[in-house]
Amino acid sequence: MGDVAVVLRVLPSDTDVDIEALRTSIKDKLKPICEVNKTEVQEIGYGLKAMKFQIIVPDEEGRIDKVEDAISSVEGVGQVDAEDVTLV
């Protein structure tokens, strides 16, 4: 088995959420689960911003679900979507 690169899009629960603090909290939560390669903040509009996380996880069944659940458990996260999954 190899590794999988996953791009996750994370939306905050509200426009008032401090996006940088939220990004730091998510990165800290993911450290024991996977490797975070890259993060970026994108302006969506009307004050709403989204974060994209590029992570590397082992190619195991249910591993991406664990990562999504961990991110969802962080206070201030509204939605988590996997945008791209690629074998590395």
Image (cartoon, rainbow, N blue to C red):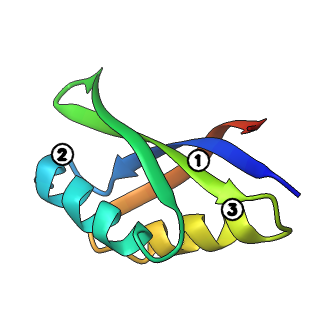
Gap in angstroms between the C-alphas marked 1 and 2? 18 Å
Q: Secondary structure at mark 3?
A: helix
**Quadrant where the C terminus is found in the figure:** top right
User: Residue at coordinates 74% horizontally, 51% vertically from top-left?
Assistant: 3
Residue type, mark 2 in image:
Thr
- Residue tagged by mark 1? 81
- Using the rendered image of the protein, determine whether residue 16 is visible from the camera's viewpoint: no
* Marker disc for residue 64: 3
**Which image quadrant is residue 60 in?**
bottom right
Q: Residues within 10 Å of mark 2 (few under 14, many from 20)?
A: few
- Residue tagged by mark 2? 15
* Marker disc for residue 54: none
Nearer to the camera, 34 or 42: 34
Nearer the camera: disc 1 or disc 3: 3
Q: Is residue 14 left or right of residue 63?
A: left
Q: Residues within 10 Å of mark 1 (few under 14, many from 20)?
A: few
Residue 29, image x, y percentages: 36, 73
Residue 61, image x, y percentages: 86, 68
**Quadrant where the N terminus is found in the figure:** bottom right
Nearer the camera: disc 3 or disc 2: 3
Gap in angstroms between the C-alphas marked 1 and 3? 11 Å
Nearer the camera: disc 1 or disc 2: 1
Residue type, mark 1 in image:
Asp
